[in-house]
Image (spheres, coloured by chain):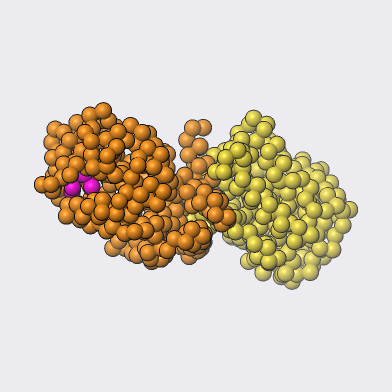
Amino acid sequence: MTRVCVAGAGVIGSLFAGFLSRVADVGVLVRREEHARALAEQGLRVSGRADFTARVAASTDPRELGEPELVIVACKGNDLEPLGTRLEGRFEGATMMTVQNGIGADEILGRHGDWRQLSAVTFMSGTRHADTHVEYILDTATWIGPARGTTGDDARAAAALVASSGLLAEAFDDLRPAQWSKLIFNATVNAVAALTGLPHDPHFAAVEHDSDLGHLVRDLVDEGKAVAAAAGVELREDPWEMNVHATRRGSRHHPSMLEDVEARRPTEIDLITGSLVREAARRGVPVPLHTALYRLVKAKEASWE
Amino acid sequence: MRICVVGCGAVGSLFAANLAQLDDVEVWAYDLARDHVDSINRSGLRLTGAGEVTARLRATADAGELPPCEFGIVATKAMHTDSAIRATAHAFAGGCVATVQNGLGNEEALAAHCERVIRGTTFPAGKLVEPGVVQWDVKGDTTFGPYEERPAPFEEVERLADACTRGGMPATAVADARGPQWRKVIFNAATNPLGALTGLTHGRVCEQPPLRRLVTQLVDEGKAVAAAQAIELDADPEELIDYAARPDVAYGHKASMLQDVEARRQTEVDYLNGGIAGFGRRHGVPTPGHDAIWALVKGVEASWTQ
C-alpha cells in the first residue's frame, strides 16, 4: 500500500485522510497533542456523502509518521510557513502536494526543502464537527498538476490514487492555466460580493451605466490577467467570460466570502485576493483595484471585532 | 427679508431656526414630511446640543403656499434637488437660490429652474431626532459664492452671508466658492463610502494604515480633478480628515453614508464619488478609485432590492 501523510487536519485534510485510509497507509500530522491522541484512539469518522470510520496514525511529530511517498499539505494558507519550518529535513523521499486556496503555496513550501512537489486546487467542501468527525458535503473535484521536479505522469498517479479512494480528482499537465483562471475569477467575484452584499448575479456583468458593477469586475479581471501574463501563465478560460456565463445561468450563487461576511466570520481574502496581490507585487505589476478591495474586506472584518 | 429653506432636515433646520431669530428675517420652511411640518407650525422648531434654539416659523408641505422670497436655501439630500426646486422655483422668481447640500451637481440642478444661483458649502451637522426637534452636533462655517453659469449678484450673496452670520450660522461670501466645496466633497468622497462599505466609524477608517492610504489615493484623484478645473482648494482635505479623526472631534462618528446604508436608504454616492468621476471624465482626468467605490456603493444599494 502507498504510504501517505496528510499534514493539517482541517476540513480538507480530514477528508483526504479519511478517504485515502481506505486505499493507503495514512498518517496525519497535527499541531495539538489531544488532536493526535483522539485520532489515534477513536479514528476519523466521515459522514455526509459517505459514512465510515477511518483508522489513521496521528502525531504532532513528523518523525513518528514514517517515510511517506506522498505528503498532502492541507493546512490553512496562513499556517504554511510555520508548517514548512517543521517539515525541514523530514520526508526527504516524499512528493509534497499543496492544496491551499490561491496561488504560490508550492513556492512557499519549496523554500523549506528540496522535495519533489505537486500543486493542487480543491473544490470539495465539508464541515468539521469535531477533531475526529468530518462531514463530506460538496463532492467536487481536486485538480492536480506537476510542480517542482514532477511531471504530468506524477500528477496522474496522484489523481488516480485520490480517485481510487472515492474522492474526485483530475490531473493536468499544467495546472496553472486552470488554477489562475479560477483564482482571478474568485478574487474578483468574492471580494465584490463580500463588499456589496450581492450574490453573483447579473449586476456583475452590467456595463450600461458608468456606475454599473460590470466595469469594476472587468477592470479587476484585467488586473488579474496582467499578473498572469507577467507570470507567464496562459489562462485556460477568460475569467470575464466565466463571470458573464455564470451570471446568465439564472442562478444566484452566494460566494463563500459573502457567506462569511453575513456570518461575520474571517474570510479567505488573504488566501484569494491576497495571493494575487502578493504575486503582483513580486512581479512588479500594479493592481490598485484588487489592493483597494483587499483593504476594504480586511477593514470590514475589523469592524466586527 | 424673506428666506425659504427648501428641505428642512437636519442642516436645513439649523439654518431655518437660527435665521428665524432675526427680527428683519421672515423664515419659511418647505418640507415633504408632514408630521415634521405640523410639529413646527404647532410648537416651533427646536435645536438642542451645540446650541439651544426654539424658533417660530412657517412650515409647509405645499409649495403653492410659499410667498415670493428673496432667498432660497436648498438643503435637501442631493437626489431630491431637482424635484424640490421644480416645485418651489416660482417663489424665487425674483430672488436668489443657494445650495448648502453635499456633493457636486446641485448648482447645475438649481440653475435649470432659477435665474440667480449661489454655490454654498456648509460644515455644521446634526440629526433630526423627532418631528420638530433637531440635535445640533457640530457648529461650523458656511461659504457662499455666485454660481458661475447663472450667478447671483455679489451684493446679494453678501446679504445672505450677513444674515446667516447674524443669526448664529457664521458665513462668508467669496468670489469663487468652488475651493471650499471641493475640499468638502473630496473629504466626504474619500471617507464616507469607506465607512459605508466597511461599517467603520471615521476614526477607525483613519487609524488603519492600509485603509488610510486608500483614503489618500481617493483624495489625490479628487485633487487632480479639481486642479484640472483650476479650482484652488482653500485647504488640504487631508488636514480635515486627520482633524476629524481625533477622539475629541469625530472619531466615533458614523458617516451619513454609513447611517444610510444601515437604514437601507439611498446614499449620496452619485453626487460624491459619482460627481468627482463625472467631472473627471469631462476634464480627461482618470478616477479609477472613485469609479470603483461608486460601483461598490451602488452595488450595496442594489442588494437591498434582491
Q: Which residues are magenta?
A: B14-19
Query: Which picture quadrant has residue B12?
Result: top left
Asked whether residue B263 is drawn in magenta, I would say no
- B116 left or right of A185 in image: left
Q: Position of residue B182 (x, y in %)?
A: 41, 57
Query: What residue is at 72 percent from the left and 69 percent from the top?
Result: A111
Asked whether residue B16 is drawn in magenta, I would say yes
B37 in relation to A256, above or below: above
Query: What residue is at 64 percent from the left and 62 percent from the top?
Result: A286
Q: How many marks?
A: 0
Q: Position of residue B188 (x, y in %)?
A: 41, 54
Instruction: Depth check: give the residue in front, B105 or A103.
Output: B105
Instruction: Depth check: give the residue in front, A229 or A77.
Output: A229
Chain A pictured colour: yellow
Instruction: Depth check: give the residue in front, B61 or B213.
Output: B61
Quarter of the picture containing the C terminus of chain A is bottom left
Chain B pictured colour: orange
Residue A249 visible in the displayed image:
yes
Q: Position of residue A36 (x, y in %)?
A: 62, 56
Magenta segment main secondary structure = helix
Query: What residue is at 31 percent from the left and 63 percent from the top?
Result: B247
Q: Check the image and name the residue furthest to the left.
A: B23
Q: Position of residue A295 (x, y in %)?
A: 53, 57
Q: Check the image and name the residue furthest to the right.
A: A153
Query: What residue is at 61 percent from the left and 42 percent from the top?
Result: A214
Residue A298 visible in the displayed image:
no
Instruction: Depth check: give the residue in front, B291 or A162.
Output: B291
Query: Which picture quadrant has residue A249?
Result: top right
